[in-house]
Image (cartoon, rainbow, N blue to C red):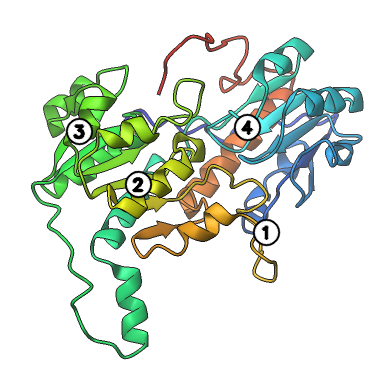
Amino acid sequence: MPSFGLTLIPITSLANPNFAMKVTVFSAKPFEQDYYHQADDRGLQLQFESAPLSVATAALATGSQAISIFTNDDASAPVLDLLQQLGVQSIAIRAAGFNNIDCEHAKKLGLRVANVPAYSPYAVAEHTVAMILALNRKLIQADRQIRAYNFELDELIGFDLHGKRVGIIGLGQIGAIVAQIMHGFGCTILGSDPVVNATLQTRFGVEYMSVEELCSQADIITLHAPLNDHTQHLVNKNLIEQMKPGVMLINTGRGALLHTTEVMEALKTGKIGYLGMDVYEHEKDLFFYDHSQNIPLDDTFARLLSFKNVLITGHQGFLTKTALQNITDTTLYNLACWNQQQASENELFPQAVPANLHIY
């Protein structure tokens, strides 16, 4: 498969032999900690904290020159003020998205911020396709029936992917790979993105159009847009009304791309026939934690789980060995650059995204 521009950061020796920079790693999960064995060699002293970053937990970074955060950490202005007062100078985001950080305030405070712009678009793209297949062929329901020794087939009828029209909103690295995979199934690919990729047009026959036109034609719609002021609640009641009856909707991008309650109403009427979600609008404090002994407090999420035509995974689309290694390598690279008083090419500043830029 072509890489569609994926560039991995080489691991080079950037350790500062005279100073070990202390880094507090927030929202550190057991599955990722083993990947940071090269930290000592790069002049970094990591302090892993399972707690997410917030106003209440910022003090855990006392004595650290840098922190590392994940997708659901709170890096809003009040938290950034606390971090600066503690002496934190740099923030390494262990993800591509950075909508959870107040970038303008971070820039105002002089904090250095870097992300992992590309770790493995194949991981998320393949998870997207897995959700499409599982929903279509009702694999979860089939497994439950078989385990109950129910071998009837009446409720397990799917459809051929071949010949279906797949609409991809956001044709960056991940969306491009989804286009390639679904083209391999014999699907017609519809795309919506501010930037037209000529390679996708010529190799996979992608037909570019507006979001509204795409929704009116597609049998399957999958979202791969970043979350910003223009894309928040992109899929709402008005857009849903333009979709084909029984459409399949997949979201492995950002939870708030969907207006969840309005999507749920469309599920109840059958306007949306299938829903696959790896992200959720209100996933903070829910995903990445074991709540099996707790009383469910999110009524909307609990209702979504009651639908047989809904498949939800807990933000695991990125979770492959390749992606975890690439995230670790790039995060350590960013931190080591700062420890060596060098700039990283992954820094978000001084290149600022204009507030009025419609980008996805």
Q: Are marks 3 and 4 in contact (CB under 8 Å)?
A: no
Report the side of 84 relative to 351 (left or right): right
Out of 74 and 302, give the one closest to the viewer: 302
- Looking at the rendering, which quadrant does residue 251 occupy? top left
Marks 3/4: CA distance? 44 Å
Callout 4, which amino acid?
Tyr
Pointer 4: residues within 10 angstroms few (<14), some, or many (20+)? many
How far is the residue under mark 2 from the one under mark 4? 45 Å
Q: Nearer the viewer, mark 3 or mark 4?
A: 3
Secondary structure of the residue carrying tag 1 is helix
Q: Identity of the amino acid at label 1?
A: Pro
Quickly name the residue at label 2: 266
According to the picture, the residue beneath numbered tag 4 turns out to be 333
Residue at 24%, 37% in the rendered image: 243
Q: Secondary structure at mark 2?
A: helix
Q: Specify whether residue 287 is in view.
A: yes
